[in-house]
Image: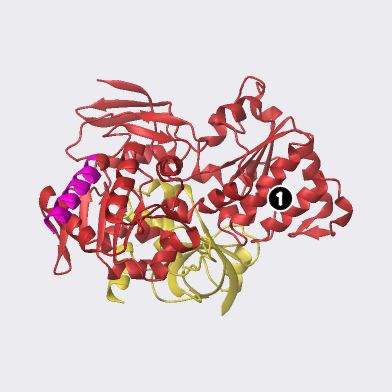
Amino acid sequence: MKIKANLISGRTADQGAHLEAKTHKGYFDACAYCELNSADLERLSASEGDSLKVTTEFGEVVVFAKANEGNPDGLAFIPMGPWANAVLSPDTHGCGMPGFKGIPAEIEVTDEKPLDMKSLMKKYLED
Amino acid sequence: MPVIKDAVCSLCGSLCDDITVTVEDNKITKIENACILGHSKFVGMFEHDRIETPMIRKDGELVPVSYEEAIEAAAKILVNSRRTLSYGWCSTSCEAISGAIKLAEETGSVIDSTANVCHGPSALAAQEKGSPSASLGVIKNRADVIVFWGCNPVHAHPRHMSRYSSFSKGFFTEKGRKARTMVVIDVRKTDTAKLADKYVEIEQGSDLLLITALRSIVNGHEDVIPETVAGVPKAELLELAETLKNAKFVCIFFGMGVTQSRSKYKNGDAVSSLISDLNQHTKAVMIGMRGHYNVTGFGQVATWETGFPMAIDFAKGYPYYNPGETGANDLLVREEPDAAIIAAADAGAHFPQKAVRHLARIPVIQIDPYANPTTELADVVIPSAIVGIEAEGTAYRMDAISLRMKKLIDSKFKTDEEIVKDLTTKVRELKRGA
């Protein structure tokens, strides 16, 4: 089962508290997840902590599922950081700013586990 | 045991300047008044993954070298590069930023700040329409209607509401939160939205529609407004417009929900127009919720030294600015830079994959106190002292008020200011040799 979602990214207090501790597991826990509301998680048959694969025109990334009832249906949120940036839009529409919010995405449950920060960055060196 | 009062927190753009720090044996052992972010900044520095020594990548691995070797290797990269991108410089002092601009001029580089992925569009909006603003002190003392639009200070600027806005008590606002109306406009019910008197949930990417509708109502043209705009019923919009018009003093704080969503700088441009319209009825101002503690300082220093706030290209020998062309992400996505220097910011973590992929292919020099995703891509790594803790310097708060950051403890590391000076001297030496 896949759902279509509108993906946004943004700051959180936990992400901010790990801004200078990005090699720590706390940063991974603070950033490598995707928030959906419970109804959307139910549509995916996913529970909190399950792995989700988020795919956009620009790439794919595996992150953990997290529930947030503040999200309207179909709105997915990944905290700003390398996991979100694996799938957000590099297009600046000629004004300098990439597309960090409002990216069409497909989300599904996967058996894969999210990569830690170093493994994620290593993929760029191997490309 | 020295207790240092009124230290400035060098984490977010709120630049809280009331932090009390206790220092024992050159270590910070106690911190008072800081939020979760500030606490992590001051106390966390002894637990975080500090870059302990300069390093150069050899056979795929970063290996320790002397400071002089790292400076020489970095200078060689810069001298041999035909198109260097210098990026970041926002978690550092204005003095270091000034040095970085000099280095960019010396090497014919493009220099850009973290505004490229944050409030860059707000700078463009200000150039289009202006940015009627005030100091946070004025907001504290006067604003009775506070709007948070596309921003979430509970998470990103945790003490903002208690020090400067919703909860603070000022000269004409002595009742604090009770006498202020707090409005939150966002696409999801954030923790900030939960504290609002009025929460307006809009469809993601439709900010411009909502601002335009509000402007129409404020200007007396409510008859042209359809039954819903941006997912918001007309009645709710009429009520919001009345709240804004009837205020004594309105401040719209706006964040990346405004700058990063569809229409980008046109959103900030429209907010500025709305502020002008509101000023026909009352007093109104706008302030961007700036992220890095001195991203505002970069804009200030760059503007007085080059005429432009960011994305400045020195390739022609004089400053040239066209953000959709000379912005850090545009350059990387076009695969234009053949080398990069990334300092006091983390492009590895905060740029989209296509830009990071190009960084991975070119020589990267990193200047930073901590290891982060950029370190994984860097070829030369130069550790620096933490400004506001191990080094003093000037920073600008989000309302463009300058504050002097204190040095609280001694450090074995050189400051960003010293590093960039050494690098510029070495570049000049190598160029003379050539």
Classify B131 as above or below B150: above
> Disc 1 on helix, strand or loop?
strand
Q: Residue at x 39, y 66 (%)?
A: B332
Residue A35, percent across and down? 53, 61
Task: Kindly tell me whether residue B188 is visible in this rendering.
Answer: no
Identify the residue under disc 1. B200
User: Which chain gets the yellow colouring?
Assistant: A
- Tag 1, which chain? B
Would you say residue B423 sits in the magenta stretch?
A: yes
Task: Kindly tell me whether residue B340 is visible in this rendering.
Answer: yes
- Considering depth in this image, is B6 or B42 the residue closer to the camera? B6
Would you say residue B135 sits in the magenta stretch?
A: no
Residue B422, percent across and down? 19, 45
Seen in the image, is B282 located left or right of residue B25? right
Classify A49 as above or below B286: below
Residue B192, percent across and down? 60, 44
- Considering depth in this image, is A110 or B11 the residue closer to the camera? B11
Chain B visual colour: red
Q: Which residue is drawn at 66% across and 26% down?
A: B142
Seen in the image, is B57 located left or right of residue B114? left
**Residue extending furthest bottom?**
A1
User: In the rendered structure, which segment of residues is drawn in magenta?
Assistant: B418-434
Q: Which image quarter is the C terminus of chain B in?
A: bottom left
